[in-house]
Amino acid sequence: MKTQYALKTIVLLLAGVGLAAGGYWFGTQQHGENVPTTEATTATNTGEKIDPKTGRKVLYWHDPMVPGQKFDKPGKSPFMDMQLVPVYADEGGEQGGVKVSPTLQQNLGIRFATVRREETRDTLEVVGTTQFDESAAEVVQSRVTGYIERLQVRTPMQRVKRGDAVATLFVPDWIAPQEEYLALKRSGNDSLASAAKQRMRAMSIPDGWIAQLERTGQVQRNLTLASPVNGVVTELAMREGAMVSPGMTIAKIAGLSKVWLVAEVPEAAAGQVRPGTTVEAKANALGERTYSGKVREVLPGVSAATRTIQARLELDNRDGSLIPGLFMRVRLVADKASSRLLVPTEAVITSGKRAVVLVAGDNNSMQPVEVTTGRDIGDSTEILSGLTEGQKVVSSGQFLIDSEANLKGVLPKLAGEKAAQGTAAASPNQQGGAAVYRGVGKVEKVSPEAITFSHKPIPELQWPAMTMDFSKPNPDAFKGIQSGQDAEFSFKEGKDGYVLENVTTVGQNKDGSKK
């Protein structure tokens, strides 16, 4: 009995030891999966994340296909069949900055400019057209009843000079008073002759006519009406043979010594224009000659068709170079100057939703900074927020593109020449405005819409080896491609992802024929 009892005791003790050992092993395995190594834990306790393999400081981990999503620890990407990629502090910072070697800067023609503060005046660029100065227009009218015997000016827009004949009238009502005056003068009755002369003046017979009548003793039948100014006949209201009455307009003549310029100002900018605003205007037809003036008045009312208001100004035109109807570029300049932060306009990369400027940092680094822009002043753009005076920004280079979609592909390209060391590289060619990239991998799946590749790293896009889908340009494309084949492929970024350009299996030419 004692022997059996001892054996049972030993068996129970061994079982307890086994359970304890198994529990300890299971606990260590579970703990090992959730707790970082001692080195990583120490780094975390100091507030920094250190890569134990490289010793470099890690800012965060991300999926290169979804760069906006950040993770605070490594692991498998929830978006793609790949591991998360670390972003190191010495690779350009959290905002995606990059380092560009001086050699690459020279090859790309990169130039820098300094953010500056200047006193500038608000300007507004609009268009306008020249018109006749209606305030200086003159009319040629008849003061008597008569008939137009001859028109010396026969068409509108005809140029005339001061004193040029416009029309000749036959005035029958002036014949009898002239004959009466001559008869009384010949009779020697000076008092009656003087009364007849006063009656002719009362009938609006010109003094020149009366003087000529006294000198020649001949009755005059025709009255010539002359132009009172140098200008252009803008309106011709009568024709030869027509009867005219006192006060009827025969012609309207506008002078050209001054012309109006009517500028079309957008409704939203109406508050920037007021009488007295300085104006500079140029006409394409007259080269770079600049005309200066001031706004005379802002006309009331808004055009229903163009949603603009009209600002009228007066331009000196004594040399006659300006003609009515001329299209002009108008620059309205505010009277008071304001202090503004400015950068060259070409330094601002716009996407429609935001504006970005590449700021130069230490050690040949460049940092994309989102800015808020204001007015465009000449070749410069006002910066309302995002930059400070004295910073250096990239103002010119081949990489300055105006698309936010292309920006994220360009910054990795600038990050260095390491891409050439990978198994795949981006094509330098541009097709349809997007960069074309190349990769090597194994075909995992083929469908009418896409081909799934397990591809090797693509350093140009900072992609590690992973499995992902690439869209086909059309369902009938790449019919010879099958699952399990090794292939080289090229692709570019489209609206809804990456689209294949070409797929060639290993051992084939690009046209699909065997090598």
Image (spheres, rainbow, N blue to C red):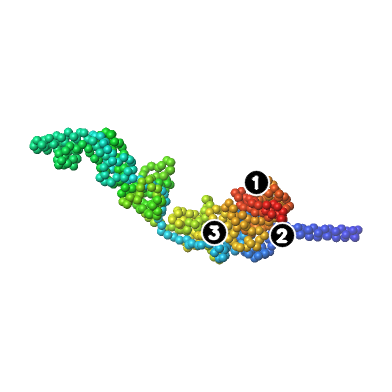
Q: Position of residue 323 (x, y in %)?
A: 35, 47
Q: Work out whether residue 412 or residue 231 is closer to the camera in this orientation and state it.
A: 231
Q: Position of residue 62 (x, y in %)?
A: 63, 56
Q: Which of marks 3 and 2 precedes in the sequence?
A: 2
| Residue in the picture at 29% in, 40% down | 251
Q: Is residue 194 above or below residue 49?
A: above
Check disc 1 and report the residue beneath it.
474
Check disc 2 and report the residue beneath it.
32
Check whether the beta carbons of the residues at disc 2 and disc 3 lie within 8 A of each other: no
| Residue in the picture at 14% in, 34% down | 180
Check disc 3 and report the residue beneath it.
398
Which numbered circle lies on residue 515? none
Q: Residues within 10 Å of mark 2 (few under 14, many from 20)?
A: few
Q: Which of marks 2 and 1 precedes in the sequence?
A: 2
Q: Residues within 10 Å of mark 1 (few under 14, many from 20)?
A: few
Q: Residues within 10 Å of mark 3 (few under 14, many from 20)?
A: few
Q: Position of residue 245 (x, y in %)?
A: 25, 34
Q: Position of residue 75 (x, y in %)?
A: 67, 57
Q: Quadrant of the C terminus?
A: bottom right
| Residue in the picture at 24% in, 34% down | 146
Q: Element under label 2?
A: helix
C-alpha distance separating marks 1 and 2: 48 Å
Residue 94, image quadrant: bottom right
Q: Element under label 3?
A: loop
Check whether the beta carbons of the residues at disc 1 and disc 2 lie within 8 A of each other: no
Q: Element under label 1?
A: loop
| Residue in the picture at 52% in, 57% down | 357
Query: Comparing marks 1 and 2, which lies closer to the viewer?
Result: 1
